[in-house]
Image (cartoon, rainbow, N blue to C red):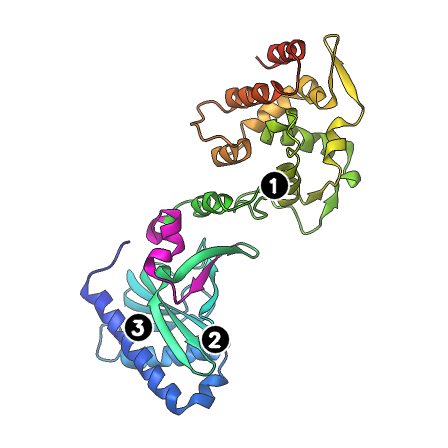
């Protein structure tokens, strides 16, 4: 963890310590006032204490209340190129948990060195805790986008960043900070589950949920080829092979299909080079180029996850073909397998 060991930062932490101590004293004598304060009102209270305590320090006249427009709520400027922040949270319950900011921090104030979190429990007994922000983030929840979850009672080693194996200051500098979190969250999923929020730059699916039967023939064919690119296991006899596909269709495209088996097996069999095959192999004959084009577009993290492989991927298409043949070994006889090898290789 990167810590700013300097006089400016030490002055900032002393400023917060004095402000929290005064909040505690005042709340003991004016309990009714604080019990009736809401989140925005309490931000103003915190700002008032921090601003007053900044007198005769390097922060005097340089405390700004932003309050929800950007992150964090209160900024203490050293100069135009250096500042520290205070995020303010409140609760009326007896729990020290709440939802934090977006992991992308798109509204983060420029040049913030470190951020602390002031949490006010505005219920009997009134209490306040002030800790370093990243040390109180224990997990990620997905609302309209991934957001940190706050718990003021966790130990530093229990933070989400320790679980993921990357420091907060490193994560926020990544072009896509959701990638390490996505890998971590996927490890906790059960068989057939998927993340409904996939990535910040994924195509949006809209708010509506569509049923497969209402799609056009072109849309069905397009999704079928995409499915085979993501799930070569569909060529196997695995009875669970449609579980992950069903959640993938919903999470990525908002499409529900209660009869996926029928979708890929309806019509009985298809003849390829004079030999009968399960219907799904028609896509290997007629849509192979489209499937391969889609394979090349899949992110490596998604390949590892959906294909369930841990080996390095040097060539996506070659690996996809290997996976197809591996799954075909248990679903096809020798004559059928030889034909598929000819088509793929």
Badge 2 is on which residue? 94
Image quadrant occupied by the C terminus: top right
From the image, tell me which residue sits under label 3: 62
* Distance Cα–Cα, label 3 vs label 1: 53 Å
- Circle 2 packing at 10 Å, graded few (<14), some (14-19), many (20+), is few
The x, y position of residue 68, in whole percent, is 47, 68
**Residue at horizontal 62%, vertical 38%?**
244
Name the residue tied to disc 1. 192
Marks 3 and 1, the one that precedes in the sequence: 3
Number of the label disc, if any, that sits on residue 27? none
- Disc 2 and disc 3: Cα gap in Å? 34 Å
Q: Residue at x 52, y 32 (%)?
A: 308
- Identify the residue at horizontal 36%, vertical 47% (top origin): 165
Q: Earlier in the sequence, mark 2 or mark 3?
A: 3
Q: In the image shown, does 326 or 78 lie closer to the viewer?
A: 326
Q: Is residue 160 above or below residue 314?
A: below
**Which numbered disc, 2 or 1, marks the residue that appears first in the sequence?**
2
Contact, mark 2 vs mark 1 (Cβ under 8 Å): no
Residue range of the region highlighted in magenta in the rendering: 146-170
Label 2 secondary element = loop
Q: Report x, y in % for residue 176.
A: 44, 45
Mark 1 closeness class: few <14, some 14–19, many ≥20 residues within 10 Å: some
Residue at 39% of width from left, 50% of height from top? Answer: 163
Queried whether the magenta region covers residue 172, the answer comes back as no
Q: How many marks?
A: 3
Depth order, front residue of 2/11: 2
As drawn, is 75 to the left or to the right of 106? left
Q: Residue furthest left?
A: 7
């Amino acid at each position: 963890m990167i810590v700013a060991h300097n006089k400016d930062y030490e002055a900032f932490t002393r400023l917060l310590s004095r402000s929290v101590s005064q909040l505690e004293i005042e709340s003991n004598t004016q309990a009714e006032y604080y019990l009736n304060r809401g989140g925005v009102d309490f931000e103003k209270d915190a700002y008032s204490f921090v601003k007053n305590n900044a007198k005769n320090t390097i922060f005097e006249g340089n405390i700004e209340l932003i309050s929800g427009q950007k992150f964090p709520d209160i900024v203490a400027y050293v100069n135009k190129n250096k500042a520290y922040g205070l995020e303010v949270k409140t609760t009326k319950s007896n729990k020290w948990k709440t939802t934090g900011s977006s992991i992308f921090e798109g509204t983060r104030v420029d040049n913030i060195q470190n951020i602390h979190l002031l949490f006010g429990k505005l219920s009997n007994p009134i209490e306040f805790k002030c800790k370093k922000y990243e040390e109180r983030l224990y997990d990620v929840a997905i609302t309209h986008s991934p957001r940190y979850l706050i718990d003021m009672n966790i130990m530093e080693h229990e933070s989400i960043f320790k679980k993921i194996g990357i420091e907060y200051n490193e994560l926020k500098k990544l072009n896509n900070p959701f990638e390490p979190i996505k890998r971590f969250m996927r490890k906790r999923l059960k068989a057939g589950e998927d993340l409904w929020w996939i990535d910040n730059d994924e195509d949006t699916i809209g708010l509506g949920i569509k049923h497969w039967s209402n799609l056009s023939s072109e849309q069905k064919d397009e999704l079928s080829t995409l499915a085979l690119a993501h799930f070569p296991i569909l060529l196997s006899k695995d009875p669970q092979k449609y579980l992950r596909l069903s959640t993938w269709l919903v999470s990525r495209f908002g499409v529900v299909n209660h009869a996926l088996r029928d979708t890929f097996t309806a019509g009985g069999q298809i003849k390829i080079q004079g030999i009968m095959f399960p219907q799904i192999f028609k896509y290997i004959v007629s849509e192979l180029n489209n499937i391969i084009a889609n394979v090349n577009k899949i992110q490596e993290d998604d390949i590892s996850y959906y294909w369930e492989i841990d080996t390095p991927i040097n060539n996506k298409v070659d690996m996809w073909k290997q996976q197809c043949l591996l799954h075909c070994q248990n679903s096809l006889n020798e004559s059928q397998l030889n034909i598929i090898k000819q088509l793929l290789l």
